[in-house]
Amino acid sequence: MTDKITCFSLLAALLAPFVPAQAGAPAPVVVCYPGGAVNERDADQAMDAMLRVVERVGQWPEKSFSSVFTAKVADCGKLMAEMKPAFAITSLALYLDMRGQYDLVPVVQPRIDGRTSERYRVVAKQGRFHDMDELKGRTLGGTMLDEPAFLGKIVFAGKYDPEKDFALQPSRQAIRALRSLDKGELDAVVLNEQQFAGLSALQLASPVETVFTSAEIPLMGVVANARLTSAQERARFAQALETLCADPEGRKLCDLFGIQSFVAVDPTVFDPMARLWLARN
């Protein structure tokens, strides 16, 4: 199993240049992808190619906009503050953390395998642990551990504090964490939907089983600064997303990242996540 650039990277292709940093300059699009296996060079190249497709599909002038990518949570906050983008790609945790400060409004979601939500799972060697309580004090690996608040508040719904209850060992690749689990170097690994689906392709020496499954969590996509965009502008993005995967070249990109289509999102689907985020644990 190999990690792919997730839907966050592909979604960056759909952002239009409403607020250029200076006259004639491409508008910056902040793309935040914490904990992923993608390096900045690969991400920049992939997103540059995607932006060119969207410019053609959306009939925008070539080189109208560009992307700024970071895999570091702290850098994302700095980029949002300095560049004040009209649109951005963020993880769900970053959206929940920054939505009040920047009046962020969800615009679109990706649809993957017919779904716009996913579940997270914690896996361990078969028969070793029966539930999360038995894992307390043990080592937990995974690619989303750079955002422990998301894991604790959203994935675990406030029932566990990752930094207090487990010894966290972040990884840039799920396959590395799973191999460490197989070797006995980790006690458990937390996986997102796509990573869990790839388990069957691995040739692990020891079988694994799920000891925890989260509730359904909505997939995060494009967010807009409501102060810098109008409802009509946000609607235009939603329409462009629907068009991209139907375009011959755009469809190749959608297929590459396992995305079936893009759909306009009702922001209220994130309200339960916001309540979990704000709850005192």
Image (spheres, rainbow, N blue to C red):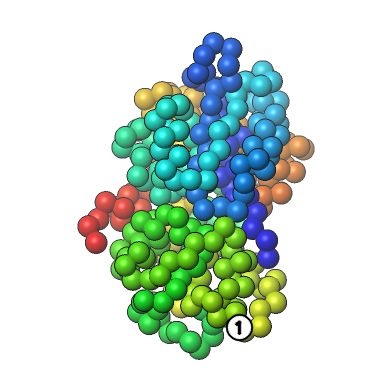
- Residue lying at 58% horizontally and 16% vertically, measured from the top left: 25
> Residue reaching furthest right?
248
> Where is the C terminus found, in terms of image quarters?
bottom left
User: In this view, which residue lies farthest toward the bottom?
Assistant: 127
Helix, strand or loop status at disc 1: loop
Q: Is residue 109 visible?
A: no
Which quarter shows the N terminus?
bottom right
Q: Identify the image quadrant of residue 41.
A: top right
Which quadrant of the figure has residue 24?
top right
Compared to residue 208, the image places residue 101 above or below, namely above
Amino acid type of disc 1?
A: Pro
* Along the line of sight, the residue nearer the viewer: 42 or 92: 42
Q: Is residue 130 above or below residue 156?
A: below
Left or right: 163 with respect to 71?
left
Q: Position of residue 164 (x, y in %)?
A: 31, 67
Is residue 129 found left or right of 99 in the rendered image?
A: right
Q: Residue at x 36, y 40 (%)?
A: 98
| Vertical placement of residue 35 versus 22, above or below | below
At label 1, counting other C-alpha atoms closer than 10 Å, the crowd grade (few under 14, some 14-19, many 20 or more) is few
- The residue under the point 42% across, 43% down is 74
Residue 100: % across, % down: 31, 37
Residue 23: give x, y in percent of width and height: 54, 11
Task: Tally the numbered discs.
Answer: 1
Question: Is residue 66 rendered to the left or right of residue 223?
Answer: right
Q: Is residue 61 visible?
A: yes
The location of residue 253, given as percent across then percent down, is 71, 43
Q: Nearer the viewer, residue 52 or 182?
A: 182
- From the viewer's perspective, tell me whether residue 157 is left or right of residue 238: left
> Which residue is at 35% across, 32% downward?
102
Q: Which residue is mark 1?
A: 207
In front of the other: 128 or 196: 128
